[in-house]
Image: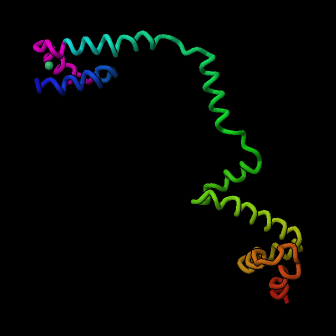
Amino acid sequence: MKKCEPFKDLILTDFIDGQMDRDSAKRLESHLQGCDDCRAFLNEVKVNAVLPFAKASHQPVPAELWDRIKADIENEVPEPGRLAGIIDGLKGLFIFPRLVPVFASLMVMLLVGSIGLNTVQVKQAQAKEQGEYLVSLLSPSSPGDSNEAGGPIEHYFL
Ligand SMILES: [Zn+2]
């Protein structure tokens, strides 16, 4: 009886899936010829597990079901707005998604700061003194304050 277990396992897995290799099929077949118990088991499995699905597999899925699944999927993922798209693009740069809004607002601050400053100065600063320039922009004082932000840069040119 103990010998039957692997064959019953085989029937319940590979046989049902139709994935049985030739060796297993041969071994199962020869075992079934001498084992009424496993033959009955196989028959039971066929009737209860294989045949119902064999019939069902030929039925087409109703179009309305597909539509409902599609609608559900679309509802789960909201249409990404412009900001959401930008944030999605930045997500790969950060381990913690919570930092993304902080980074986004920093970018806005940098952008506002750049517009407030002389363009040539900004370009020179970015090329040669990027670190100092960024530090000056990130300092607690307002980024729009050109005296504060331009201080180190002016010092560089003098
Ligand atoms: Zn058996």
**Left of 3 or right of it: where is 8?**
right
- For this view, does 118 lie left or right of residue 8? right
Please report the residue visible at 83 percent of the width from the left and 88 percent of the height from the top.
155
Q: Is residue 56 above or below residue 11?
A: above
Quarter of the image with the C terminus in it = bottom right
Q: Nearer the viewer, residue 140 or 16?
A: 140
Q: Quadrant of residue 3?
A: top left
Residue 100 quadrant: bottom right
**Percent x, y of residue 76:** 64, 36
Magenta segment: does it hold 104? Answer: no
x and y percent of residue 128 in the render? 74, 79
Principal secondary structure, stretch drawn in magenta: helix
Q: Residue at x 62, y 32 (%)?
A: 73
Q: Is residue 128 visible?
A: no
Q: Which residue does the image show at 25% across and 21% down from the upper left? A: 11
Q: Which residues are magenta?
A: 20-39
